[in-house]
Image (cartoon, rainbow, N blue to C red):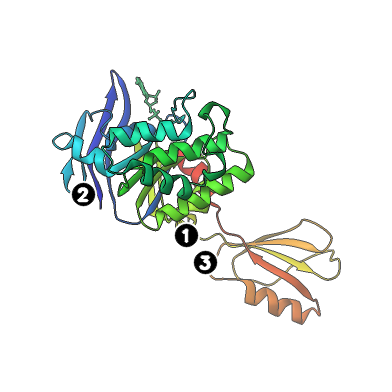
Amino acid sequence: MSIKINNLSKYYGQQKALNNINLEINSNEVVGLLGPNGAGKSTLMKIITCFIPPSKGSVSVNGMDIIDNSIDIRKQIGYLPENNPLYPDMYIKEYLFFVAGIHNIENPKKRIQEIIELTGLTIEQNKKIRFLSKGYKQRVGIAQALIHDPKVLILDEPTSGLDPNQLSDIRNLIRTIGKEKTVLLSTHIMQEVEAMCSRVIIIKKGAVVADDATGNISKIFGEKNIITVEFDTPLNELKPNIEGLLHTKKISSTKWIVESSTKKDIRPELFKYAIDKNLTIISLNKETNTLEQVFQRLTK
Ligand code: ADP
């Protein structure tokens, strides 16, 4: 199951929300769509799920075009819209029966019980939606998106507003679902992506500015050559004879930062320097760009 997006643009009147997007998303990937508020994440999701049409370009889901095969595509996509719209006066099961009816699901009772268990709703299953915590409401939103066993799951800000325990439960649930389905989720929180996604797509003002495996994204601006070194005794000065040394900076009596301009890893040289000076190193760490730093530099 793949999603192919070609030269996609979207205008709301004069407002350009998406600007010539090209992407391909393949099976069994959990992809994080990351961008500041207003970047175009929800717009992209609404187009893929056939809720709104594009202004230019095309999108296909499993080879079917979103305009020509909208009904068939909707059958294969589960969608949790932003702000998770639910019917608060319905009971959980009543609501899931209603959604199962829309999808014409055979034996809805059995499927609803399966989905209640999968999404961890069992202990709350007899309650009205209104009385659920935000975390459980989110589970109901994910349950309705999964009820017809779609191959693709599109989740718009699935973890927004959750407390740390609810957050961890929903992240685990999404990771479990991602083993069997293609998941595209949006967020403006970097840690979400690091916790759940194998791939990150960063968008800014409607355009893709980065697209890579989560583990690679921190290398976008090159490796930093900043080392934090800690000795077992206080030092007054640190002047290692290292090629390309830019500066050393004391951050506590025993801890120093050493920055060099070379691409070479300077840790072995620092280690030799310590031995020559009869110093004992107790930690030596190389800094890398965090996803947060990359995100800020790309989207500012
Ligand atoms: P995100 O989900 O990344 O926060 P959106 O896709 O919601 O971004 O919005 C992208 C841009 O399009 C924003 O500038 C937003 O104000 C604008 N926008 C979104 N929906 C509409 C709409 N229905 N009418 C006019 N402008 C809209």
Q: Amino acid at mark 3?
A: Lys
Residue 182 image offset from top left, x and y in percent = 34, 51
Q: Nearer the viewer, residue 32 or 204?
A: 32
In front: label 3 or label 2 = 2
Residue 123 image offset from top left, x and y in percent = 57, 43
Q: Amino acid at mark 1?
A: Gly
Which element type, helix, strand or loop, lies under badge 1? loop
| Residue at image coords 22%, 28% | 55
Which element type, helix, strand or loop, lies under badge 3? loop
Asked if labels 2 and 1 touch by Cβ distance under 8 angstroms, the answer is no
Residue 273 image offset from top left, x and y in percent = 72, 77
Residue 134 image offset from top left, x and y in percent = 56, 34
Instruction: Give the number of the disc on residue 215.
Output: 1
Q: Which residue is mark 3?
A: 263
Q: Which residue is mark 2?
A: 62
Whether residue 44 is visible, yes or no, is no
Q: Nearer the viewer, residue 135 or 87?
A: 87
Q: Residues within 10 Å of mark 2 (few under 14, many from 20)?
A: some
In front: label 1 or label 2 = 2
Q: Quadrant of residue 43?
A: top left
Asked if labels 1 and 3 touch by Cβ distance under 8 angstroms, the answer is no
Q: Quadrant of residue 268?
A: bottom right
Q: Residue 201, relative to residue 257: is it above or below?
A: above
In front: label 3 or label 1 = 1
Q: Quadrant of residue 184?
A: top left
Choose the circle earlier in sequence order: 1 or 2.
2
Which element type, helix, strand or loop, lies under badge 2? loop
Q: Residues within 10 Å of mark 1 (few under 14, many from 20)?
A: few
